[in-house]
Image (spheres, rainbow, N blue to C red):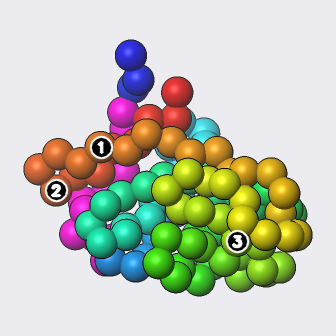
């Protein structure tokens, strides 16, 4: 069974934004897409730079450094220069609290 760690209040991450957290030694970006929350490793698979600094358009985050694009819901790489996906993590929200599992 997955161990979930509380990272933030849902109200602390506005729609269309992301925040970075350390969860059990993993740096995780939590994204709010229309009040649905997703978590990805906060590390672009191209150059290991934080994707939480990127530009969010619909369900895509574009890396601010080299333009790689990732599907926020799955972590899949959508265009060069990234070819490998970013790891995604399970998220749950209870009583305005966001929990992430990196198991």
Q: Position of residue 88 (x, y in %)?
A: 56, 45
Which one is in front, 21 or 54?
A: 54
Give above or below for 99 relative to 33.
above
Label 1 belongs to which residue? 92
Q: For mark 1, give the secondary structure.
A: strand
Residue visible at 36% across and 33% down?
A: 4
Residue at the limit of the structure toward the front, as seen here: 78
The answer to which quarter of the image holds residue 61 is bottom right
Within 10 Å of disc 2 (Cα), the crowding (few <14, some 14-19, many 20+) is: few
Q: Is residue 79 left or right of residue 24?
A: right
Query: Could you tell me residue 63's position as x and y percent?
Result: 71, 75
Q: Is residue 9 magenta?
A: yes
Query: What crowding class fits label 1: few (fewer than 14 Cα within 10 Å), some (14-19), or many (20 or more)?
Result: some
Q: Could you tell me how far apart the alpha carbons at marks 1 and 3 are, in whole angstroms?
A: 24 Å
Instruction: State which mark lies toward you, 1 or 3.
Output: 3
Report the mark closest to the observer, 2 or 3.
3
Q: Secondary structure at mark 3?
A: strand
Label 2 sits on residue: 96
Say what secondary structure mark 2 lies in: loop
Q: From the viewer's perspective, is 6 left or right of 47?
A: left
> Marks 1 and 2, how far apart in space?
10 Å
* 37 relative to 103, above or below: below
Q: Is residue 38 magenta?
A: no
Magenta region, residue range: 4-14
Residue at the spot 37% in from the left edge and 44% down from the top edge: 91
Instruction: Name the residue tied to disc 3.
Output: 69
Q: Residue furthest top?
A: 1
Q: Of label 1 and label 3, which has the lower sequence position?
A: 3
The residue closer to the viewer here, 8 or 16, is: 16
Residue 6: x %, y % from top left: 32, 44
């Amino acid at each position: 069974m997955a161990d979930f760690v509380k990272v933030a209040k849902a109200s602390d991450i506005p729609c269309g934004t992301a925040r970075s957290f350390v969860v059990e030694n993993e740096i995780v970006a939590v994204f709010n897409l229309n009040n649905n929350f997703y978590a990805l490793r906060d590390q672009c698979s191209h150059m290991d730079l934080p994707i939480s600094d990127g530009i969010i358009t619909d369900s895509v985050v574009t890396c601010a450094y080299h333009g790689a694009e990732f599907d926020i819901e799955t972590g899949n790489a959508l265009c060069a220069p990234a070819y490998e996906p970013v790891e995604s993590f399970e998220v749950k929200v209870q009583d305005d609290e966001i929990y992430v599992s990196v198991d």
